[in-house]
Amino acid sequence: MSKFDKPWVLVGLKEAEYHKVIEILGREPNDVELQMFGVMWSEHCSYKHSRSTLKKLPTKSDRVLQGPGENAGVIKVLDDLAVAFKIESHNHPSFVEPFQGAATGVGGILRDVFTMGARPVALLDSLRFGELSDPKQRHLFAGAVEGIGHYGNCMGIPTIGGEVYFDDSYKGNCLVNAMCIGILHPDKIRKGIAKGAGNLIMVVGARTGRDGIHGASLLASAEFSEGAEDKRPSVQVGDPFMEKLLLEACLELFETDAVVGIQDMGAAGLISSSCEMAARGDVGIEIDVRKVPAREEGMKAWEFLLSESQERMLVCVEKGKESEVEAIFQKWGLLSAVIGTVTDDGMVRVLDNGEVVANVPAHALADEAPVYYPEKQEPAYIAQMRTFDFTALPQPEDWNATLLRLLNSPNIGSREWIYRQYDHMVLLGTVVAPGGDASVIRLRSAAEPEMHGVTRQAGLAEGDTLPARPCPIHAPKGISAKIDCNARYVYLNPKRGTAIAVAEAARNCVVTGATPVAITNNCNFGNPEKPEVFWTFAEAIDGMAEACNALGTPVTGGNVSFYNETSGQPIHPTPTIGMVAVHENLKHLMTPGFKNPGDVIVLLGETKDEIGGSEYAKVIHGVLAGDAPELNLEFEARLQKAVLAAIHEGIVTAAHDVAEGGIAVALAEMAVAAKPGARGCQASIFVNAGRIDGNLFGESQSRIILTAERDNMMRLRSLLISHGIPHRLVGDVNDTDRFQLAALQPGVESEFIFRRQDLIDLPVDELEKAHKEAIPQWMSA
Amino acid sequence: MLFKAEVKVSLKKGVLDPQGSAVEGAVKSLGYTNIPQVRIGKFIEVWVEADSQEGAEAEVKELGKKILTNPIMETFTFTVAPSTDKLVQSTGATEQASKTGVQ
Amino acid sequence: MLFKAEVKVSLKKGVLDPQGSAVEGAVKSLGYTNIPQVRIGKFIEVWVEADSQEGAEAEVKELGKKILTNPIMETFTFTVAPSTDKLVQSTGATEQASKTGVQ
Amino acid sequence: MRFGVTVFPGTNCEMDTYHAIREVIGEQADYVWHQDRDLSGFDAIVIAGGFSYGDYLRTGAIARYSPVMESIAEFADKGGLVLGICNGFQILTEAGLLPGALQRNAHLQFRCGWTHLRVENADTPFTSAARKGQVLKIPVNHGEGNYFVDPETLAELNANNQVLFRYTTPSGDATPEASPNGSVENIAGIINKAGNVAGMMPHPERAVESILGSEDGRYLFVSMVEYLTGRASRV
Ligand SMILES: Nc1ncnc2c1ncn2[C@@H]1O[C@H](COP(=O)(O)OP(=O)(O)O)[C@@H](O)[C@H]1O
Ligand SMILES: [Mg+2]
């Protein structure tokens, strides 16, 4: 390597890291080996900055069958049904080319899940862009949504939910995170492992080209800077059709006993999959890159190793069973090729047409990247933000207009513009569609293996009896899922803000009637080598750990995306939480819309005058300051239990959590989503202390609004009392098509005399219009 | 001998072209008021091994009618010329299907 | 004066073309085994009002870079010639499109 | 009755269609692989939705050349019932078994959501269980469902009562806003002249259980069963 003074620079390593490589090998690495270390020891592949911190997260429970470390986490739902799920980011590629970047992000997370042996049954997406008034942001947003739809729709996997926020901090670095949920049999989890010397290593799926070379090491592990154009690899183009074939072929393959282990080829392609599989099995692997089906001529050995061509898998196959594998892939019109064997010497040996071009211990690549404990320093802005004086802000003069403006904010309004571009119905599982809080899919594997079973079965054999006709399906179980992260809270208070993200994701599932069981997470942060950024990351992980412990939702996996900065400016720290919850009985499905006139509206939890970090402060006053709302995790857990108990007792007619925009917006959303004939309400909010706007629009945590039939009110109240949940009757549902909201304040004369102030009185149609147009008003221009 | 055909597919007159209209609108909104119309079709490059120019042309014409266009909405024109291009492999999907012989 | 430009947009070399690959596979399985490669791009017809051929060319070039193609993945070539085409009015499809919703 | 549900590379609604027929309607169903040629034993064929061959080039353009399509053309020729749903409709038009073509949605976006369909002709094997003028709630899910046909053929379709469904408001008005895609005359589904091959963009198999939001999709399958059993008993 004497060709260059500083060979490590070429592959993105640090000098000390280069010396460590020499120490491990006992010699200087050659070009190919250096490339391999460069990519495997990159932040994206090695988690060298985050690994030590992530250890704090709880990862175990009775339900967790597979925690972090594999391609996806797995939890048990029934004795014969498990759920695999994981989240991935594709931020930088989406900023460069939003359609393809987002599409290939979806492709990647799908492979992570079906490589576990699961059939993907749901996708969710989490998006962040700058404000929509900027045409560039509209372009990114429209492109990312179209790309996600393109991939998921073509694959026939419903995108059942997600979240989106628009904030200037993302204008130079958008976030596109995608989550996938799959189902499998608990005894049939597949792992990314190679075992048994003499077994074969096969590449299946697409041909390998020069796509995305260095995506992991350079793009995902360094900040964006202007003029970085030349570093950019050629854009990866997703081929969902190819992936659909790959999915069906892999699931069919898993029905055989030919597979020892399997791993998708994502970031750092062949090299990362082969060394990780070898390291997990404590074996060696010998592969010849010339045996890999190539798309382009003249590819170099290191290009094969680093290529990020999509829609490929690496499979360790039982010796002698390769023709079984070939036959299945051929049936699906796909290529498969034996490229090497498992060895027992622990080395990853790479040949180029028989000639050894690299020979490196698998563990060195996969597990021995340096671990850093970066410096931490609380950023100065945090203390500064807390000193903001909210009392200086004027209260609204026109409360009607204020509510309409909030409903019309792209951060609050309807997301239909997004999800109507996604197939959210295919597979006939979606029993609560996007548009409410969390979405819900039913699971039917136990009762009806031929439907959502892992593989497609042939039709009825002769002599099979048909089910009685008609055959209504009452699917007993379901899964609820939500992605959530209000990054403003995290920005103001990383620890509490992250705990809120966990709590809110859980709350969104709880209001559908599901019990939260586990999370996956995607930590999107700036450059971890900056002490201020690392501090926020470490705090965020602390907050996540606390909340997960309190709510009994261990972390089964996740993804860390650092270096989300442009020209030195980091994004708001965004630890996106992907929550999965189990519906024990779909009879108790709950949705937020009002159901019957006459139902009473009950507000659970305590309302404080908390404007810090709220959408109200931002949209109406242009202020992002203060502190994140308070959060008492013990109370949160109790609240969620109580609400689940109430829903399961069948005494609740609607449930909705209070989030951005506070009570006023939450109630308005319930009115907009109401059944015909129940589109109206009259409510009075008790303002105990503080400002009226802070009470109405503030975002105090741990609040849920329920409605109940009047006859069930006493039962509901006693249930809430027995759980120790403070609550108030705030009004009732009616059929007037009007939304009326008043404030009740203790009078100045005496605290026992309440003054009623009628603040909001609007036709629900008008609320609906403001809500519906929030995103389209920008996008159809 | 290797030939390369360039097939230009356009929508028939009278068939609405929403994509073209959208681009037209975008172009206008950028201030290009002198662009009265935009229509969007497909540009398909097909490499053909054939004995002669005529042979290649006949083949491309057949392909154009049979699969590259839908005569209900599209028309096409094409040119054929000898080529020295280095070709890349397809991605692999349905590659083997051809071996197993879909007719 | 009215000119008509024909803009041929193709994917850059090295950029995967799943569409082209799929068509290639299909064409092969139809028995056209002598078609080693197919790539699919766009064919855009742009009518331009300009004073001169050069003016029209400059404008089309600018449009091509700015809006007709995605420079990250595509390249384009074009020709410009005087045109006597009678143009139809834009359909207005996009205007209506935004209104059309699914209920 | 035995339904065949086609599976092309890229088909993704076959499991749903299979479920609707077998579990909800209670009839037999089998998957038919795109390379199969043998359709003996089937009383009806449903070409299921999805993205056959990735929808590349044009929707349905590649699938129409599959071996199974030759058999389906023969099956239809002999009077067999063929229903094309979404991509199935697109394949049938490409194959020339139904007139017209499906273009990209006028607004250029993919659309998934509920639509309302007015039954225009209830005197067919696919709609007999419904009433003429009845409005069915059935979802769409497509990027290219914008039905196009030349004016002469359109006039013929109308004259022969070949329009099965139009997109309407919930109360049955065929307004432009009620259409999710800009189809000519709000056409959502048509039938061939012989009356045994139908195509529709909306997905009846997604609307067969109340928990999914509607049961109106059953009308399609029940009509087919009634027609087939009726005929069977006549024979
Ligand atoms: N990017 C997206 N993709 C798909 N669905 C989305 C997206 N963003 C939001 N949604 C859906 O819109 C609804 C409202 O989302 P959100 O405002 O995030 O809810 P909440 O405020 O309850 O967290 C949910 O059903 C959610 O799944
Ligand atoms: Mg919510």
Image: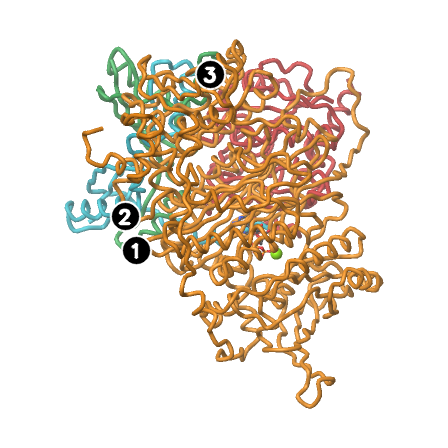
Chain colours: A orange, B green, C cyan, D red
Q: Note whether D2 is above or below A687 in the view shown.
A: above
Residue A762 location (% of width, % of height): 62, 71
Q: Do the residues labelled 2 and 1 touch (CB within 8 Å)?
A: yes
Residue A179 location (% of width, % of height): 53, 42
Spatial CA distance of label 3 from label 1 is 64 Å
* Residue beneath the point at 31% across and 19% down: A357
Residue C66 got which mark? 2
* Residue beneath the point at 49% across and 71% down: A620
Q: Which residue bears the numbered disc 3?
A: A344
B42 or A711, which is in the foreground?
A711
Q: Which residue bears the numbered disc 1?
A: B30
A307 or A670, which is in the foreground?
A307
Q: Which of marks 3 and 2 is in front?
A: 3
Residue D219 location (% of width, % of height): 71, 36
* Disc 1 crowd, CA 10 A, few/some/many (<14, 14-19, 20+): few
Q: Which of marks 3 and 1 is in front?
A: 3
Chain letter of the residue carrying label 3: A
* Residue beneath the point at 75% across and 31% down: A447
Disc 2 is placed on an element classified as helix
Relative side of A344 to D192, left or right: left
Spatial CA distance of label 3 from label 2 is 56 Å
Disc 1 is placed on an element classified as loop
Q: Do the residues labelled 3 and 1 touch (CB within 8 Å)?
A: no
